[in-house]
Each structure stands twice: as structure tokens, then as C-alpha cells.
Amino acid sequence: MPSHFIHEAFVVPTTLDTEHFHLRMLEDSIAQLDFEAVMSSQKRLQGIFGSGSQWPKVDMTLEENAESLKIHQQEFESRKAFAYSVFNTSNEGVRNSVSG
């Protein structure tokens, strides 16, 4: 059984640009944009990680979101998980995020 999520030699892309959207590694530099996207969909996102999950809390702060994004970035850099922000075509607004 392999001990790595992906092969060590694989270079994980940090970005992907298409004519319809842009992906960027999830990191704290986009905390404000991500926070706005998450909180605007807070009710819809509640429970997405299971019925016991409290994320995103109604009173989640920008600072808490930034800390969460730092963890996602650390996971990415250590190759444990790969989370991306999905930007609109103008590259100005976060539409969503995806992870694997």
C-alpha cells in the first residue's frame, strides 16, 4: 500500500487558469475574499462535513478564517491535502473552493 497521497515526484500545480474560472492554492492571502464567499453561503455550507460539524459558525471571524486558510496552505505544502480557491473569470472574487 502506498504511503503517500500522491507520488513524490508529481509536481502539484498551485494554479489553473481556464476561460471559465481560475484555481489558486487556498492560502491566507485571500482571507477576506474567502470569508465573504463562505459567510454569504453559511447556511448552505452548514453540515457539509457531517451533521456534527459546526463549520462555518454563524459568528466566525475573519481572523478564524485566515487561520483556517493557513492550515490549508500547510496541508498543501506538506502534500497531505490540496485545497484551491475558485475565482471568477475576472480573478477578483472567490466563487467557491475545492479540495482533494
Image: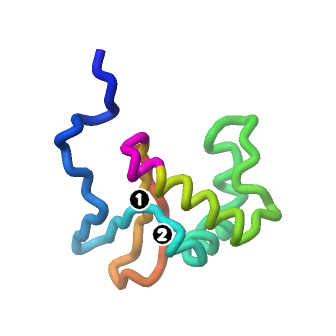
Residue 49 in the image: state x and y as whole percent: 62, 40
Q: Earlier in the sequence, mark 2 or mark 1?
A: 1
Asked whether residue 69 is drawn in magenta, I would say: no
Residue at 32% x, 70% y: name it: 22
Determine the CA span between mark 2 and mark 1: 11 Å
Residue at 33% x, 79% y: name it: 89
Residue at 34% x, 33% y: name it: 5
Question: Magenta part of the protein: which range?
Answer: 75-80
Give the farthest residue toward the right.
59
**44 or 58: which is nearer to us?**
58
Identify residue for label 1: 84
Say what amino acid the circle numbered 2 marks.
Answer: Arg
Quarter of the C terminus within the rendering: top left
Give the farthest residue toward the left.
9
Residue at 23% x, 38% y: name it: 8
Q: Which mark is residue 95?
A: 2
Vertical relation: 90 (above or below) 85: below
**94 or 41: which is nearer to us?**
94
